[in-house]
Image (cartoon, helix red, strand yellow):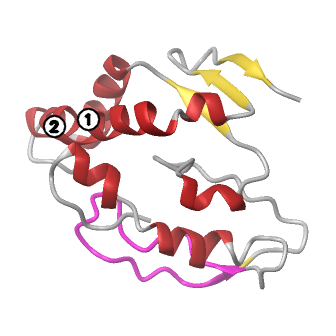
Amino acid sequence: MLARSDRSGKGFFAVGWDYDAVRNQLLLPLGPDGNRRYVVGVRETSARSALDSPTRTATPDAVLLADGAFLQRPELDAHWDLRIYIHVSFDTVLHRGTARDQAWKDSPAAAEHRYLTRYIPGERRYVNEIHPADRAQLVVDNEDPAYPIITRAQQ
């Protein structure tokens, strides 16, 4: 659930995601006292335009597995039963992100620039301020996606 933000890493970390929408349209409805009516997104991947996501209704036995950047921010703490941190190096982030995002950016260089100036600086700030690996009950090293390695599992 992307929000608009400035083009800096600081801006991406601060307002790159619409945490109110994540909480109100996904986490609360799928939480213990929720009505199970949720939406899967409010903006498309590049955050250039809003999505017209239909409201869906989860089954009573549904389990939410949420994947996204900065989800261990304190304002979302109350909504997680289990935190998993997927670790990859920033070099790997740059390589994978550039390869993936060049499809909707103007060029591979434009995709790389986005990661070097916005995403990676925002992610570094998140790692340094929030310490998501320390907060997670499960940490997975995903440098090689064919062979993920659980590096920490807390009971």
Residue at figure coordinates x 28%, y 64% from the top left: 47
Magenta stretch in the rendered image: 37-56
Tell me how far mark 2 sits from mark 1, CA to CA. Answer: 6 Å
Dot 2: element: helix
> With respect to residue 149, does 73 lie above or below?
below
Say if the magenta span includes residue 39. yes
Residue at figure coordinates x 33%, y 67% from the top left: 3
Say if the magenta span includes residue 50. yes
In the rendered view, does 10 fall on the left or right side of 84?
Answer: left
> With respect to residue 145, does 85 lie above or below?
below
Disc 1: which residue: 121
Q: Mark 2, residues whose alpha carbon is within 10 Å: few (<14), some, or many (≥20)? A: some
Q: Is disc 2 in contact with disc 1, using a CB cutoff of under 8 Å? A: yes
Closer-to-camera residue (147/113)? 113
Numbered marks: total: 2
Disc 2: which residue: 117
> With respect to residue 102, does 6 lie above or below?
below
Whether residue 35 can be seen here: yes
Closer-to-camera residue (9/146)? 9
Name the image quarter holding the N terminus: bottom left
In the rendered view, does 149 fall on the left or right side of 35?
Answer: left
Residue at figure coordinates x 47%, y 22% from the top left: 88
Badge 1 amino acid: Pro
Dot 1: element: helix
- Secondary structure mostly seen in magenta is loop
In the rendered view, does 66 fall on the left or right side of 125?
Answer: right
Image coords of residue 8 (percent x, y): 17, 47
